[in-house]
Amino acid sequence: MTETSPPTAADLLARARRVLPGITQTYSKAPDQHVEGVYPVFLVRGDGCRVWDVDDREYIDYPCALGPVILGYHDPDVDAAVHGAVDAGPCWSLGHPLEVEVAELIVDMVPGAEMVRLLKTGSEATSAAVRLARAFTGRDHVAMCGYHGWHEWAVGHTARNAGIPAPVRGLTHQWAYNDLASLERVFDEHPGRVGVVIMEPVGVVEPRPGFLESVRDLAHRRGALLVFDEVITGFRLARGGAQEHFGVVPDLAAFGKALANGYAVAAVAGRADVMAQIATTTFVSSTFGGETVSLAAAAATLRKLQREPVVAHLWRQGAAVRDAFNRIAASHEVPARMVGLAPRRVLEIDADAGVDANALKGLIWQGCLDRGVLLSNANFVSYAHDDYAVARTVEAFEHALGEAARAYHCGDVAGALRGAVPGEVFRRA
Ligand SMILES: Cc1ncc(COP(=O)(O)O)c(C=O)c1O
């Protein structure tokens, strides 16, 4: 019998190019979003805060699967719950007790959650929230601020809007974070027609004092419901999400990502009178919404969040990483900063630095990768990012920012990149 060796990254990439448009199922994970030619493309294993690529190289992982991995890979409590659910069977002809249990945990933890619909993806959860708010208010127009997923109402305004009918595009209007007047303009331009204000409660810029309260009051005054897209902030900023952290409770909220430590569970949750429409006048339904392997993971994740100081850990380690990066960048006079609240940070290049921002970002990522640290556009931390991992990360920053400084001060950032300059998902072709 001949033994076949596992495929190399290069083999897999060639095969993927033939059968997978864009290579990965999430644009942000694609090779052209990183330093193509240098970055790994396929990861196959994780443990704690570490991941391994197909060629068995090990990295400390900061994208955390773009946010879902909040406890760490292979968390023992989640693994035990998942194994139990696998043994029992994953999907059922009727309801399952785990649906009740996970909904109750969300209601216990999230201030504005009175009822819950369980789904699979963040896009489904935000879309369900938009449908519920439209149904409740009897108004079709949506005022949005941020990224809310791939569904038609959410991407009509972007460069990738082919396939979305013009009348649908016309129902969604953008407004700017921390700019109440821009939201007021949307209401003024479409009087009596805006039923939904949807926003990420915080992205990388913090809300001005009173801003979130003003948005809620304006939405209500003008007859709309407020939806917080907590797909990223949920269970990370506080156990009850950004609404607990900032003390502003929306009518509805969408959750996903960290809800089940990497298993596919999302939820829309909020006011009982709005949510109840699911059982009467509107329709939100999913074959896999009650799939129990993921729900077992969700229950184990939420219980661990209740029991252990996970959120405090995310704030502490995220701040340690962010502050070390900013200190080292400043000492090397590299015009780069990690911005955002500690649990979720983004690497930004100063706009007036006179450099190709994506090239400099890529060069810093490349230097970190050389020292076994995987960064991406969105950087998180998990409960498994211990002090040793943070110390190794700080060493990687010293190396990467030293290299970046040499290239930047010689004016040859692109020349120092060993691969392609990272791209942007919504850049116009
Ligand atoms: C704020 C926000 N909302 C919604 C989504 C969509 O979630 P999903 O990719 O699970 O559909 C994302 C995904 O990145 C997100 O960051």
Image (cartoon, rainbow, N blue to C red):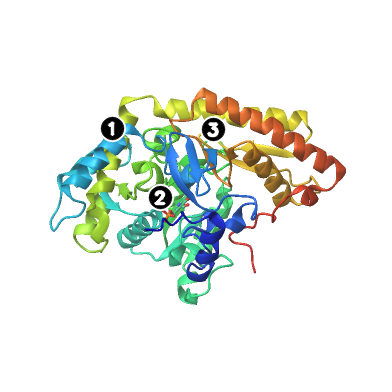
Q: Nearer the viewer, residue 226 or 153?
A: 153
As shown in the figure, which amino acid type bears the numbered disc 3? Ala
| Res. 226 mark | 2
Task: Say whether marks 2 and 3 touch (CB < 8 Å).
Answer: no
Task: Say whether marks 3 and 1 touch (CB < 8 Å).
Answer: no
Give me the C-alpha separation between circle 2 and circle 1: 28 Å
Residue 117's place in the image compared with 347, above or below, is: below
Say if disc 1 is inside 8 Å of ligand 1: no
As shown in the figure, which amino acid type bears the numbered disc 2? Leu
Which residue corresponds to mark 1? 303
Q: What percent of the width, then of the height, locates residue 326? A: 68, 31
Give the residue at x 51% y 70%. 18
As shown in the figure, which amino acid type bears the numbered disc 1? Arg
First of labels 2, 3 by sequence position: 2
**Number of the front mark, 2 or 3:** 3
First of labels 2, 1 by sequence position: 2
Q: What percent of the width, then of the height, locates residue 192? A: 43, 63
Left or right relative to 384: residue 208? right
Give me the C-alpha separation between circle 2 and circle 3: 25 Å
First of labels 3, 1 by sequence position: 1
Viewport quadrant of the N terminus: bottom left
Give me the C-alpha separation between circle 3 and circle 1: 23 Å
**Number of the front mark, 2 or 1:** 1
Q: Which residue sits furthest front? A: 1
Element under label 3?
Answer: loop
Which residue corresponds to mark 3? 342
Give the residue at x 71% y 45%. 363
- Assess disc 2: are there few (<14), some (14-19) or many (≥20) residues with their C-alpha within 10 Å of its C-alpha: many
Q: What percent of the width, then of the height, locates residue 214? A: 49, 43
Give the residue at x 58% y 48%. 179
